[in-house]
Image (tube, grey):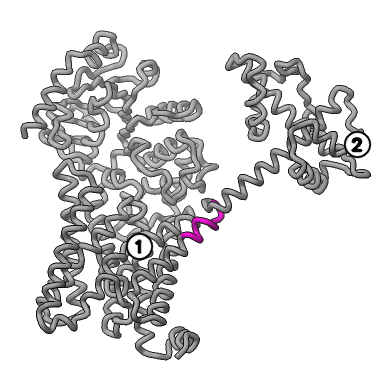
Amino acid sequence: MEPVAPIEVHDLTVAYRRKPVLWNIDFSLPEGKLIGLVGPNGAGKSTLIKAIMGLMPLLSGYVKIYGEPLDTMRHKIGYVPQRESVDWDFPINALDVVTMGRYGRLGLFGRPSKDDKAIAMECLRKVGMQDFAHRQISQLSGGQQQRVFLARALTQDASVYLMDEPFAGVDAATEKAIVDLLKELKEHRKTVLVVHHDLHTVNEYFDWVMLLNMRLVKFGPTDQIFTNDNLRLTYGGKLLLLAEAAEKVARQL
Amino acid sequence: MDWWDLTVRFFSLADANVRWVVFGSILLGGAAGGLGCFAYLQKRSLMGDALAHAALPGVGLAFLVVGRKDFLALLLGASITGWLGALAINYIVRESKIKLDAALGIVLTVFFGLGIVILTYIQKSGSGSQSGLDKFLFGQAAAMGRNDVVILGIVALTMLAVVALGFSKFKLISFDPGFGRSLGMQVGLLQFVLTTMIVFAVTIGLQAVGVVLMAAMLITPAAAARQWTDKLQRMVMLASLFGILSGLFGAYISFLAPRFPTGPWMVIVVTAVFVLSVLFAPQRGVISFIRQHYANRRRMTREHVLKVLFKAGQDSRQWKTYYPVDQIKRMWSFTQHELNAALAGLQKQGMMEKSGGMYRLSDDGITEGARVTRLHRLWEVYLSRYLELPEDHVHRDAEDMEHIITPEMEARLEELLEHPEYDPHRQEIPYIGKRSQA
């Protein structure tokens, strides 16, 4: 029997304020791989992650998690949003933020239990942040904030992780912590899809690579797919026509 | 009666009317203050203002329907149009390219205008002139009676219970709603509950504070409370407390001077709390910031004194000479005043010994002087080696960094630079008090 893909995306089209940003995306993620999601600014990388998580309305297509619809399988996915997506001056400490990863399991009026806090603490330890558990989050450096977000996703104890630019603007210590974490996740047969900007490290960090520019340009093992020709295809001018078409669609509807 | 008798009468709560006014003001202040924290943290503070203004036509319409000033009916009417206002704002922002600030302005003014039209119509139509609806613009706490306060109390306590029960969830959707949705939480529903409660918090205050100023009871306690704490739970409780205080004193002033509307007084009280918070809060406060700044400057001066005295004795390795104050002053651009303060402080700390108006370093002072000198010179080496800055460019920068580098940074610097012996100016880097510890 064919193994069921952790995430299957079929004919996915997503629009933002009526302007299409992703066209007819089709892929199935292989299990247990670290996958880099690469493409120029505005290529729709974050949008793809959000669409998979059900945070964007889909114009067409569907997303399946281990062959099932998203709503019954959310607990299988851990999500790391972009660091800039929240206000870090919020009155809350690192441990509180990490504990939020457990909220999907709480009942209507449930509160996080002692066990939830212990799990959150353990996950902070995994990213080397245990000493900062009770720090207010604005007093953390950018890299430390990123590690808090990673720890939060770890508490979800998921099978698939979607990470939106975890390497953006972090210090060397955090970069190393994230790389170690990715390796550990891979050892546990987790599937990880990471939005990534730094083309120099793609070969080193990722087994597979997905090249995206409003449509899926190429997807496959890094050593076969991550070639200059394919990069030129992804970043080059040939796809400008697609952006222009999207602009037209937005104006006319 | 003079004001003292009135004060006694007010705070003793002996008078039944006074009692209801006090309870009502406390309840609405506490509820609005606590809920306002969520609006404040979601950066939707002005939404409260728009909601309050949007509630005005509801007050008038409810009066027209019921035919008299029934608190429950007015509350319902106000909540309905308040909610419509909120929906209108969300709709405009979602479906058009108009930004939130413009949408708020449009909705707030059109609902308020509509409300004034309806109230004017009621005033002109016979019985309406005694309705007292005009008090809804700026509020009249004394207008609250027993029945009003019972309803107000039920609403406020229900909201308190909902906030307490759903606290964790409201915290999450205020901090990171996208993540909440990714967990499968009903973020839309929770936000609906929260917005509804904010609508209620605004409407229960309309009678006492008025539509024009009610937003202050929502925003200002939260902004004041944020100054004092980094914990959401404490912030909500503090904001509630500030709201209660403003409600109480607003009602008190209104009781002393009943011809004046209550709303402006409550706003003045709550703003006073806010100003005091901004000034005196321990970490975020302005005064604490200024004190910190001056404490840092005094520490830097003390460290400079230790450094110049250490350097004065470094060549001969002889630090036991006493120096007159004038001579120390010439070693650096000290002002007389700051030097005197620094010397006195250092003597107190045991870093400096004094004899006959002259000073010298104690053993601790020598170690500390060596440390500051070392940090200065290590930083110079770092800059010249890694940033390839010329020798004459590194001194200014090191002058600041010597006060800032932590022991951990120092250890890393030393390791990175492999314990250099000399700085770029060929001056010795002192490791006194350092090697002996190791």
The answer to if B281 sits in the magenta stretch is yes
Percent position of residue B71, x then y: 22, 78
**A92 displayed left or right of A8:** right
Q: Is residue B183 above or below residue A191?
A: below
Reading the image, the residue beneath label 2 is: B322
Range of magenta residues? B275-283
Quarter of image, res B298? top right
Quadrant placement of the C terminus of chain B: top right
Q: Is residue A19 above or below residue B158?
A: above
Q: For residue A238, say whether it is visible.
A: yes
Question: What's under tag 2, amino acid-wise?
Answer: Tyr
Q: Main secondary structure of the magenta part?
A: helix
Quarter of image, res B334? top right
Reading the image, the residue beneath label 1 is: B216
Question: What's under tag 1, amino acid-wise?
Answer: Ala
Do callouts 2 and 1 point to residues on the same chain? yes
Which chain's residue wears label 2? Answer: B
Residue furthest to the top in view is: A229
Residue that appears at 35% across and 48% down? B175
The answer to if B133 sits in the magenta stretch is no
Percent position of residue B424, x then y: 70, 16
